Image: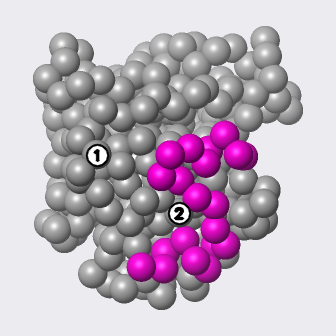
Amino acid sequence: MRTVTWTSACGRPTRRPPARPSSHPKEITMKIGIIGAGNIGALLATKLGAAGHDVAIANSRGPETIDPGILTEGVRAVEAADAAAGAEVVIVSVPFARIPDVAGLLSQIPENVPLIDTGNYYPGRDGRHDAVDAGQVESVWVAQTIGRPLVKAWNSIGAPSLADKGTEPGAQGRIALPVAADRDEDRRAAMDLVEQTGFDAVDAGRLAESWRQQPGAPVYCTDLTRAEVVEGLARADRGRVPKRRDLAWAAVVERTDDFTTMPDFDWALRLNRVLYR
């Protein structure tokens, strides 16, 4: 048992591991804004900064509160209102329950700028949400709340895997991540960035189909290859996804009373692979 911190992807606590630099060619650069400096946002900042991008990252408490370890090559801390200024891609990585708090800021991003949502809904963490509990797709609700199109990506991988399991294109057993969006240009931009963080990007179709990569789905935090992700997306059962999510949550709750200690991430990975099949 060990002290841990919270991660937005996979909806369970985990230790924050160090990020591995990307080996993507440095000449491919763009301005990227990241809103949310938790485990997933921080790891994406360091990986994309290492890939040669100009990354601005912000949280709700001010740039002086951002972990200095995140501010590696190409990454700078800014105020939340400045994170998206002039950005060519914006990534929002905040808990589902906090989306209304940042909706005003996100709604001001030019509509031609891809906005990528990495978040997930967990009732035990975020509180009950009537519309999503009634069947509305998580990221469809986010898009409607913000009032603009968005992409769903990086929500289906845990922070330890994001940090340590990225590999070169073509590597045997390379983990794949689904990317869902309504606009082709948004999907292409997000898929390219997913590849730069060390993972195969799989076209998961329109945003309305992104329930197939939500918590409880076969591809969610199970570290599958491209072929396995394609197969897992196809066999996802919409009626069973929230039930499986809640089973996994209950198993985590049973292991820890205060979400400060739990077994290592491999335990959670094995649990997901059993429950989400």
Helix, strand or loop for disc 1: loop
Q: Is 226 included in the stretch rendered in magenta?
A: no
Indicate whether 240 appears above or below 226.
below
User: Where is mark 1, residue-wise?
Assistant: 26
The residue located at (78%, 65%) in the rendering is 61
> The C terminus is located in which quarter?
top left
Q: Secondary structure at mark 2?
A: strand
**Is the Cβ of the residue at disc 1 closer than 8 Å to that at disc 2?**
no
CA gap between label 1 and label 2 equals 17 Å
Dot 1 alpha-carbon crowd within 10 angstroms: few under 14, some 14 to 19, many 20 or more: few
Q: Position of residue 274 (x, y in %)?
A: 43, 16
- Quarter of the image where the N terminus is located: top right
Residue at 47% from the left image edge and 70% from the top image edge: 142
Q: Which residue is mark 2?
A: 56
Q: Is residue 77 magenta?
A: yes
Q: Type of residue at label 1?
A: Lys
Question: From which residue to which does the magenta span run?
Answer: 67-86
Left/right placement of residue 93 relative to residue 277 reads right
Q: Nearer the viewer, residue 218 or 96?
A: 96
Residue at 37%, 55% (x, y): give it. 53
Taking depth in this image into account, of 263 and 199 the one nearest to the observer is 199
x and y percentages locating residue 25 in the rendered image: 23, 41
Q: Percent position (x, y) of residue 92?
A: 50, 62
In the displayed structure, does residue 158 sit left or right of residue 276?
right
- Mark 1 vs mark 2: in front: 1
Quick check: can you spot residue 193? Answer: yes
Q: Nearer the viewer, residue 128 or 193?
A: 193
